[in-house]
Amino acid sequence: MTLAQLPAVLFPDVGTDRTIGVTDDVAALQDLIVNVIFYGTPGGPWVLVDAGMPYTALPKIRLAAERRFGPGNRPQAIILTHGHFDHVGALPMLADEWDVPIYAHPLEMPYLTGQSPYPPPDPTVGGGMMARLSMLYPRGPYDFGRRMKELPADGSVPGMQGWRWVHTPGHTPGHVSLFRDADATLIAGDAFVTTKQESAMAAMTQAVPLVHRPPAYYTPDWVSAYESVRRDLTKLWRQYRACATDACRAPLPAEYQVSVAELADLAARASRAQADYYG
Ligand SMILES: [Zn+2]
């Protein structure tokens, strides 16, 4: 790749609104190492899933939302798969601007209502430059105050009829993935990713279309992370279209099997390492 090609890789101008279509009503907008998801057909009511990186996400989401859904068309809700800094970047501004509720799992609430920061990244797993950089990532707590609402206990997703949220803990305690049974569309959040985020170059170029475990440095509970993918997500993925946080593929490539084995292996090694580390 030449340097001149790099911006096109970082910001692929796929649609006029710069989103990547997954289905007629699900599109992803790439923001450096993560995606934000737009749910809704162009011009209609819509919902934002996750809110990208600090600084870079805000202008991108504003512009894409306006182009896709029309000027002044505010979303009905914002849904968070979890509250890591790269998923809430544009939130403080957008939530005020749009004056909409933000939904997350009850177990994610302490990190989003000012009560607790996320645990520090674990330097004993992963490796690579991103893992080392992760020590510098902001960990919150964030406080989105009165706008924060718990996802409904019946599994429904506000503003997204026909979808349900699936609790997929491990990467964070209250991590959720969103699933639509009618066409097996999955918004996986960080339950798995399609680039190895420990490698800065792979994360930035989104170059490797394989499915991997979530970012190792930022996943405190590998046993749950593995169980979430093995027990909950693999059975949902059979004939799927899928949308991980960092990239969307429809359908998901067959290599995902590799990631399940990789995740199992990492869960075993990480539990041993953590047991040694914490005695
Ligand atoms: Zn995360």
Image (cartoon, rainbow, N blue to C red):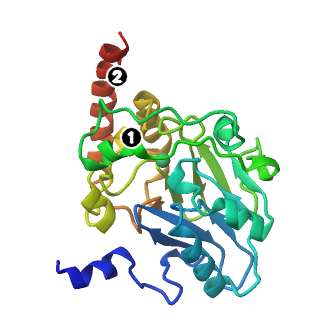
Q: Residue at x 45, y 46 (%)?
A: 137
> Of all residues shown, which one is farthest toward the front?
136
In the picture of the structure, the residue carrying the numbered disc 2 is: 271
The residue carrying mark 1 has its beta carbon less than 8 Å from ligand 1:
no
Q: Residue at x 28, y 39 (%)?
A: 126
| Nearest-to-viewer mark from 2 and 1 | 1
Task: Find numbered disc 1 in the image and state the secondary structure of the residue it sits on.
Answer: helix
Q: Residues within 10 Å of mark 1 (few under 14, many from 20)?
A: some
Residue 142 in view in this figure: yes
User: Percent position (x, y) of residue 263?
Assistant: 32, 38
> Of all residues shown, which one is farthest toward the bottom?
16
Residue 162 in view in this figure: no
Residue type for callout 1: Met
Task: Answer with left or right where residue 179 lies relative to residue 4.
Answer: right
Q: Which of these two is toward me, 7 or 207?
A: 7
Q: Which mark is residue 135?
A: 1
Mark 2 or mark 1: name the one nearer the start of the chain. 1
Task: Find numbered disc 2 in the image and state the secondary structure of the residue it sits on.
Answer: helix
User: Percent position (x, y) of residue 170?
Assistant: 48, 35
Residue type for callout 2: Ser
Q: Quadrant of residue 124?
A: top left
Image position of 102 with respect to 191: above or below:
below
Q: Which of these two is toward me, 276 or 138?
A: 138
Quadrant location of the C terminus in the rendered image: top left
